[in-house]
Amino acid sequence: MGPRLWWAALMTALILLVQVGLPLLLLSWLAFWPAGSVLGWLAQAAGVAAILFALARIAQWAVPVWWSPWAYGALWLVLVILGLDALSARPMLPTGIGGWVMLALSLGLLGVGGWSGWQAMAGRALPPVAVVDIANPFGPGNFLVGHGGSNPLVNGHMRTLDETIARFRQWRGQSFAVDFFGLGPFGLRARGWRSADPATYAIFGARLYAPCDGTVVAAEGDWPDFEVPQEDPVNRLGNHVILHCGEAWIVLAHMRQGSVTVVPGEAVVPGTLLGEVGNSGASTEPHLHIHAQRPGTAEAPIAGEPLALRIDGRFLVRGDRLRGRDW
């Protein structure tokens, strides 16, 4: 097993630990080891809720499925309703050192979860840059935002705003990008668990259409689609199309080999077929990367100043879902 496969296995284990193990541990704590006082139990329930909410907003819910936080929330609500019946028999304040320790732990969870959740929700605010409005670029299907928003907790692309790191300067235009995964039956993003075959992912082969009136600046379609989790760190965009719409460039990347249907200089209108989603370039699994920026250069096409992107009037953040359309 190569280094990338080891890293993928480690990340999968970490995801399962944080997004399955931790919620179930907290819910079990609330169910089987409830605090012995009214104040302690209320703090315990609130602390668990805060962590679950923060995870719901910060984590990528492609694995496990997007509705997992809703299931955790439903379990929490059931436990709270059942726990309310026992409150009348409990003292108001903790009566022993263990009770006070549990209260302190619960308040700590409430603080950490509350702050993290608030930071994630702050990512819904538009960043202090110009906003570009485009149409939905997808054909039929259901899609989940993996990265998006104006806070690094929900949009990993924002690290390229750090001007102290030289290599980020040539990627600066992607700082407010949106990444989409596909959603298949039961909300699953792929057939199988971390399948190596990109064709088993729901988004692979999804059709992409021009989301605006403009001109094709660049179009490449000959780069290979990699097995998951392999990637090309040099040709980062892989197969891609760049459109000049108004004063902005719209970049669609990681498209399928051989699917790009437009050429540089071609005029497009909303609904012009551009190609299909693939797994080319710096993509560890099939997804669409799309962002808006000021025009770049031939040498550094995505080094232009980043712009905010609204799709069908929505500034999308991690965890949002988007339904495709019939063009």
Image (cartoon, rainbow, N blue to C red):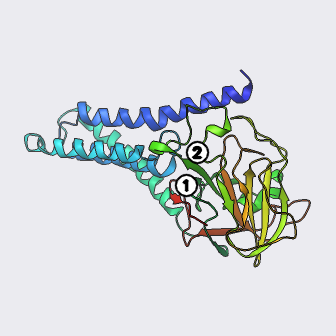
Quadrant of res 261 = bottom right
Residue drawn at the location 55% of the way across and 31% of the way down: 193
Quadrant of res 20 = top left
Can you identify the residue that label 1 sits on?
A: 141
Q: Quadrant of the C terminus?
A: bottom right
Residue type for callout 1: Gly
Q: Quadrant of the N terminus?
A: top right
Q: Which SS class for mark 1?
A: loop
Can you identify the residue that label 2 sits on?
A: 202
Residue type for callout 2: Ala
Residue drawn at the location 44% of the way across and 49% of the way down: 56
Q: Residue furthest right?
A: 299
Q: Is residue 33 visible?
A: no
Looking at the picture, tell me which residue is in the foreground, 320 or 19. 320
Residue 275 is left or right of residue 78, and the answer is right
Where does residue 83 sit, x and y in percent of width and height? 17, 41
Q: Residue furthest left?
A: 89
Q: Which SS class for mark 2?
A: loop
Looking at the picture, tell me which residue is in the foreground, 243 or 48. 243
Q: Residue furthest front?
A: 326
- In three-dimensional space, the C-alpha distance between marks 2 and 1, rounded to whole angstroms, equals 9 Å
| Residue 225, label in figure | none
Q: Is residue 27 visible?
A: yes
Badge 2 vs badge 1, beta-carbon distance below 8 Å? yes
Looking at the picture, tell me which residue is in the foreground, 13 or 206. 206
Mark 1 Cα within 10 Å, few/some/many (few <14, many 20+)?
some
Sequence-wise, the earlier of marks 2 and 1 is: 1
Mark 2 Cα within 10 Å, few/some/many (few <14, many 20+)?
many
Where does residue 268 sit, x and y in percent of width and height? 76, 72
Residue drawn at the location 23% of the way across and 35% of the way down: 34
